[in-house]
Amino acid sequence: MNTSMNVEPDALTVVNQLRDLAADPLNRRAIVQDQGCLPGLILFLDHPNPPVVHSALLALRYLAECRANREKMKSELGMMLSLQTVVQKEIVVQSI
């Protein structure tokens, strides 16, 4: 029996797929309007694995390139706080 079919994809795989979708300008509005994608990306900003956070930040940057997405992104629950936390963590890492 092949048990690999039951294994959930890891965070990096999921966030990289979202990043790759967000890289295409034709997908950006649909991703932000989807009920789960934007909140999911925000959750990835708090992930302990730096490559996951980096990939999530890239995806969010791509999404923000679509001017129509910016207001929804800014008002999304947890977005600004999570971004602030990422910046503060980066400042701490650089000062070490």
Image (spheres, rainbow, N blue to C red):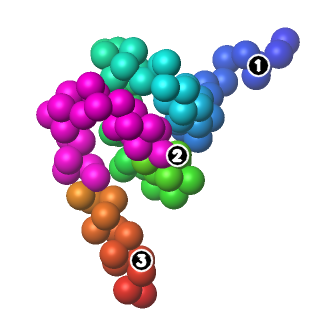
- Counting every numbered tag in the picture gives 3
| Residue 63 vertical position relative to residue 79 in the rendered view, above or below | above
Q: Give residue 39's quadrant in the image.
A: top left
**Few, some or many residues within 10 Å of mark 3 (<14, 14–19, 20+):** few
The residue drawn where x is 38% and y is 37% is 65
**Viewer can see residue 76:** no
Instruction: Pinpoint residue 90: horizontal percent, then vertical percent.
Output: 38, 70
In magenta segment, residue 59: yes
In magenta segment, residue 75: yes
Q: Main secondary structure of the magenta part?
A: helix
Instruction: Report which residue position mark 3 lands on.
Output: 93
Q: Give residue 38's quadrant in the image.
A: top left
Along the viewing direction, whichever of 49 and 65 lies nearer the viewer: 65
Q: Which mark is residue 55?
A: 2
Q: Residue furthest front?
A: 67
- Residue type for callout 2: Ser
Q: Could you tell me how far apart the alpha carbons at marks 1 and 2 are, in whole angstroms?
A: 28 Å
Do the CB atoms of the residues marked 3 and 2 lie less than 8 Å apart? no
Quadrant for the N terminus in the image = top right
| Residue 73 vertical position relative to residue 32 in the rendered view, above or below | below
Along the viewing direction, whichever of 21 and 95 lies nearer the viewer: 21
Q: Earlier in the sequence, mark 3 or mark 2?
A: 2
Q: Is residue 43 left or right of residue 23?
A: left
| Residue 43 vertical position relative to residue 95 in the rendered view, above or below | above
Disc 3 vs disc 1: which is toward the camera? Answer: 3
Q: Give residue 72's quadrant in the image.
A: top left
> What's drawn in magenta, residue-wise?
58-83
Instruction: Report which residue position mark 1 lands on.
Output: 3
The residue drawn where x is 56% and y is 53% is 51
